[in-house]
Image (cartoon, rainbow, N blue to C red):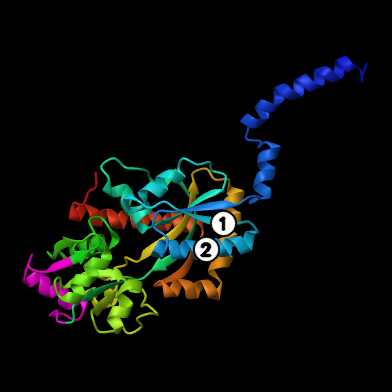
Amino acid sequence: MRNSPLLKRRNWILNALAAPSLLALGWPPLAQAQAQSDYPNKPVKIVVGFPAGGGTDVFARALAQGLTAQLGQQFVIDNKPGAGGVIASQSLLQTAADGYTLLVGSTSTQAIAPLLYAKRPYSAADFTPIAHIASVGIVLVAHPSAPFNNVSELVAYARQRPGQLNYASGGNGVTNHLAMELLKSRTRSFITHIPYRGSAPALQDVMAGQVPVMFDSIASSGPQIRAGKVKALGIAGLARSDALPGVPTISESGAGVGLGGFDTPGWIALYAPKALPAAITARLQDAVAKVLASPEVAQRFAAAGAAPRYLDATALTAYEATEISKWGEAIQFSGAKLD
């Protein structure tokens, strides 16, 4: 009776009935566990919300090449430009949280955009943070004839002439717009915003003397600073830039006018849809850390005005929260909104 066909059939039925209960208790299916343990076993797509050749794309391609070498599968870039990167971030949220579609997000897509739209396109909770990748240098520049040579003199000049000093930016809601709004908020000064359709034409007008001052990336302004076409007033970070070692930080030179601790670098980080399995997150984190330790990657980032900076998922989550709070202050002060 012990090995009778009837008994075997009864045991098979009992096991089948028990399986859903085990799954409900959190037991992963064998296939799912195996898929996580041998990740990645096929090519991985990295979505980038900006055109090929731009700053974010440069960092993403360096990362993709390094991850391909580390993990033995192709990591390929999928550029989805539009709406300041929002379209790419939204597209990620339509994919499975299996590690085969990732996003290289940025300050603008992950911290600023959700605060600018009346109807928020997404929130931090919709993503699994994987790792912080890079800090992107930003510098405050002015036309050589501007009557101020550092940030303290700029603030004093603006306070004496409220609304008479103009500044350029790449458009409403972009990082170099909100960095100046944060400076204005912290110093209680009134400087008039002149938005352009992109940072390149804005910088051209600063070099031409049409607008006296703006924030810009070190990658873009660095050559113009060295050529004497604009002058650097301060680095928008807590550490000086290797690319411009003689330029003080805004925090250093502006402490007396309310800018101690002023820190607005751009940043790049890697994300997945929410609920990415912890095993895959850990595997990606480990690989990213190894890629960023490469001298070759450091050189490629430096050429684009950035420096590798690794933070794991926990540290990235905390950093992102402080960034959202900081940029929220700038947005509230400026009244910037996008429909």
Q: Secondary structure at mark 1?
A: strand
Q: How many marks?
A: 2
User: Closer to the camera, 11 or 220?
Assistant: 220
Residue at point 39%, 58% (across, down): 51
Q: Is residue 295 above or below residue 290?
A: below
Quarter holding the C terminus?
Answer: top left
Q: Quadrant of residue 320?
A: bottom left
In percent of width and height, residue 270 lies at 48, 56
Range drawn in magenta: 145-167
Specify whether 160 is left or right of 50.
Answer: left
In percent of width and height, residue 248 lies at 30, 80
Q: Amino acid at mark 2?
A: Leu
Q: Nearer the viewer, mark 2 or mark 1?
A: 1
Q: Residues within 10 Å of mark 1 (few under 14, many from 20)?
A: many
In percent of width and height, residue 175 lies at 29, 61
Residue at point 53%, 41% (across, down): 96
Q: Is the residue under label 1 in contact with that under label 2 (CB below 8 Å)?
A: yes
Residue at point 38%, 47% (across, down): 87
Q: Amino acid at mark 1?
A: Phe
Q: Is residue 89 above or below residue 185?
A: above
Specify whether 220 is left or right of 281.
Answer: left
Q: Secondary structure at mark 2?
A: helix
- Where does label 2 land, which residue? 63
**In the image, is residue 285 part of the stretch drawn in magenta?**
no
Q: Is residue 95 above or below residue 283?
A: above
Q: Quadrant of residue 34?
A: top right
Q: Residues within 10 Å of mark 2 (few under 14, many from 20)?
A: many
The reply to whether residue 248 is in sight is no
Which disc is residue 75 wearing?
1
Specify whether 204 is left or right of 84.
Answer: left
Looking at the image, is mark 2 or mark 1 earlier in the sequence?
2
